[in-house]
Image: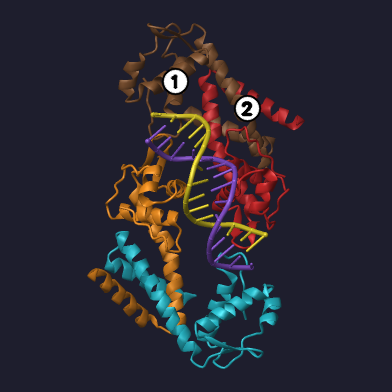
Chain colours: A cyan, B orange, C red, D brown, E yellow, F purple
DNA sequence: GTGGTCTAGACCACG
DNA sequence: GTGGTCTAGACCACT
């Protein structure tokens, strides 16, 4: 369910966080589901338990899960909405910066829109 | 000319690199111009000379400047093109990831296009 | 494994870079291997950690290694090919300049070829 | 007669030294000729007199010229031989290193000879 | 423990 | 004066 790229520069705990949110948005994980146990997931992924704990802590901080001491971590009922909202919150500023960079590079509104449309079309192909 | 945000998580040397490229694209810096001296800029920005040196080395590596020991760092004649090309090369993959995130969050093609258009309009206002 | 000549005019960090590539080409280092830690190598060579860090950054820039913060630096799977290709890319221009110098010094084609053949033979003896 | 590339990384004084030797080997400069005056050449090349002085000092150190205080620098009678010999003395070690690098990169004797021959042929075309 | 960034200060060759 | 290299030591995030 989780796939860790040890060679990637993005921190392992962050990979787990974003993949959890992705699995939630794609419906593989559902509200109410319990997350894998820290120890179980740590051996399965070959990752330090501390790293899993850190990921779970971050997920709880983001309001995606609730951790019940002694029982485990569970996806909140509104987890999908939270994740969706978070994508927009973090994505929009990034989009703004990116678009500003493009326009600074001399692209006008039409150029940029074409760029985006082409990117969207390619995505469909995949 | 350069403004350093010490609180930012993006490294100081990288801020200098990107700001140099921005100043180039906006026409404030022109091909053939000489960059401020390593020591001069370091005292002006309140930053260690080593940090400036690192930024200048990166700029030369990117083909934006030439550093001539004993003389200074100079913007290459084709610096603007190089910077422009670099924006596209690094920006397009980022755009793809961003758009994919949006679509994973449930936005369809029309939603995303609206998002982008709104972002482009806001930019005009600024 | 690494031998630093402090008296040499070629920078220490560059010595480390080229020796890494040599060790790779001679099969002592293999793709997937991890490089010594920055601090470990720095004490072993009696060199400042910063200098090792600079060498490792350059190796990553050249596509020979991947540096994963918190884990270490690792030789890429295609590291040997990259190093090999790099030798040719940087060596051929040098060869051209050298041959031009020889011909300017009055040596003709046959003279130069003999020179090269003798150098190749000597190498075998070593 | 002399052409300085201010943007080059090779020191200006060294450019003058090597160009002097080249002019000597190509017969433009002849034994017994006097070198341009330090001040004259410095204004002609737009270069600091110190730099010219340094180049002339190096040429004398190499046995190419003799400087007569109050009169100027003159090319020695055996200057061409000296220059020729110097090319070989400095070039052969470089050639050895280069050939060793090529063989380390997996090229065998035949490969390298072909490389050299091709380089020699290209030189003819120029 | 790891790599990455940064400061403070030094020395070098070059102009 | 310039850029380039290096040391000594610090802090950070991540594993």
First along the sequence among labels 1 and 2: 1
Q: Which mark is residue B86?
A: none
Front residue of this view, candidates D19 and A30: A30
Please give the count of numbered marks on the rendered protein: 2
Is residue D113 among what the camera can see?
no
Image quadrant assignment for residue D8: top left
| Residue sitting nearer the eye, A117 or B30 | B30
Alpha carbon separation for disc pair 1 and 2: 23 Å
Which residue was labeled with disc 2?
A: D93
- Chain bearing tag 2 is D
In the image, residue C41 sits, relative to residue C122, either above or below, namely below
Task: Using the rendered view, name the quadrant where residue B90 is placed.
Answer: bottom left
Element at label 2: helix
> Chain for mark 1?
D
Whether residue D41 sits left or right of residue C83 in the image: it is left
- Of labels 1 and 2, the one closer to you: 1
Q: Is residue A110 visible?
A: yes
Image quadrant occupied by the N terminus of chain A? bottom right
Q: Position of residue C13 (x, y in %)?
A: 59, 43
Residue farthest along the right direction in this orientation? C125
Q: Give the image location of residue D10, x and y in percent.
A: 46, 31
Q: Nearer the viewer, residue A87 or A54?
A: A54
Q: Which residue occupies 55% across, 23% down?
A: C102
Seen in the image, is A38 located left or right of residue B101? right
Relative to A1, D82 lies left or right: left
> Horizontal and vertical percent for residue B10?
45, 61
Q: Are marks 1 and 2 in contact (CB under 8 Å)?
A: no
Q: Which residue is mark 1?
A: D55
Helix, strand, or loop for circle 1?
helix
Crowd tier of the residue under label 2, counting other residues whose Cα lies within 10 Å: few below 14, some 14–19, many 20 or above:
few
Decide which of A50, B56 is in the foreground and name it.
A50
- Both marks 1 and 2 on one chain: yes
């Amino acid at each position: 369910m989780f796939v860790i790229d040890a060679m990637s520069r993005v921190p392992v705990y962050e990979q787990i966080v974003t993949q959890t949110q992705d699995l939630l948005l794609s419906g593989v994980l559902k509200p109410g589901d319990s997350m894998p146990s820290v120890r179980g997931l740590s051996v399965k992924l070959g990752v330090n338990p501390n790293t899993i704990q850190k990921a779970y802590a971050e997920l709880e901080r983001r309001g995606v899960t609730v951790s019940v001491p002694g029982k485990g971590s569970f996806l909140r009922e509104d987890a999908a909405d939270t994740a969706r909202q978070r994508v927009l919150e973090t994505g929009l500023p990034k989009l703004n910066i990116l678009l500003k960079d493009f326009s600074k590079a001399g692209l006008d509104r039409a150029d940029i829109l074409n760029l985006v449309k082409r990117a969207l079309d390619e995505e469909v192909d995949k």
